[in-house]
Image: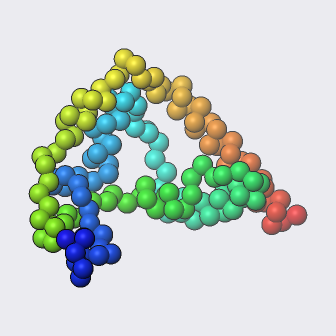
């Protein structure tokens, strides 16, 4: 259908499993078998959305890439699902059954993966606090001195 003149040129189609699964459902099954754990600290979206542009600007002005951008925050804050109905209707797409169980089994490498420990999270949190202090100092210096 894409090769014929007057065909379905320039259209986007989602070609995924037929089962609905958001991005967080996807990662909920994979993260544990990859040896990871989920964050235990949650930062509310609204304050982070207000402060992140300043932090991003400060990082770029110092010549370093920010650890999190406004775009990345927007992606993290939304759970996306995609419809394959157009592909079914216009291309005759018939999805195979979900391969998530096989994927989880494939990545079940717990013995070979380093475990994320509480010590690692303390390091990450401490580093984040240190970066925020440096950022606030830079912003204060840039705007008030």
Q: What residue is at 24 percent from the left and 79 percent from the top?
A: 5
Q: What residue is at 22 percent from the left and 75 percent from the top?
A: 4
Q: Is residue 90 above or below residue 115?
A: below
Residue that extends furthest to the top in the rendered view of this protein = 111
Quarter of the image for the C terminus: give it.
bottom right
Tell me residue 18's x, y (percent): 15, 55
Tell me residue 142's x, y (percent): 82, 63
6 lies left or right of 64: left
Residue 128 in view (yes/no): yes
Q: What residue is at 19 percent from the left and 71 percent from the top?
A: 1
Q: Is residue 88 above or below residue 134?
A: below
Q: Nearer the viewer, residue 125 or 61?
A: 61
Q: Which of 133 and 32 is in front in this view?
A: 32
Q: What residue is at 40 percent from the left and 37 percent from the top?
A: 38
**Count of picture labels:** 0
103 lies left or right of 128: left
122 lies left or right of 96: right
Tell me residue 140's x, y (percent): 79, 60
8 lies left or right of 35: left
Residue 135 in view (yes/no): no
Q: Which quadrant would residue 37 be assigned to in this image?
A: top left
Q: Which quadrant would residue 31 be assigned to in this image?
A: top left
Q: How is the image coloured?
A: rainbow
Q: Is residue 132 above or below residue 78?
A: above
Tell me residue 98's x, y (percent): 16, 45
Residue that extends furthest to the right in the rendered view of this protein = 145
């Amino acid at each position: 259908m894409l090769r014929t003149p007057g065909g379905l040129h320039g259209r986007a189609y989602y070609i995924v499993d037929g089962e609905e699964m958001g991005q967080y459902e996807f990662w909920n099954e994979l993260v544990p078998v990859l040896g990871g754990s989920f964050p235990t600290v949650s930062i509310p979206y609204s304050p982070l959305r207000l402060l992140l542009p300043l932090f991003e600007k400060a990082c770029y002005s110092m010549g370093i890439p920010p650890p999190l951008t406004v775009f990345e925050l927007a992606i993290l804050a939304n759970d996306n699902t995609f419809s394959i109905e157009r592909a079914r209707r216009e291309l005759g797409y018939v999805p195979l059954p979900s391969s998530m169980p096989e994927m989880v089994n494939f990545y079940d490498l717990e013995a070979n993966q380093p475990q994320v420990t509480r010590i690692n999270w303390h390091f990450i949190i401490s580093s984040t606090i240190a970066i925020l202090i440096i950022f606030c100092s830079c912003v204060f210096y840039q705007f008030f001195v």
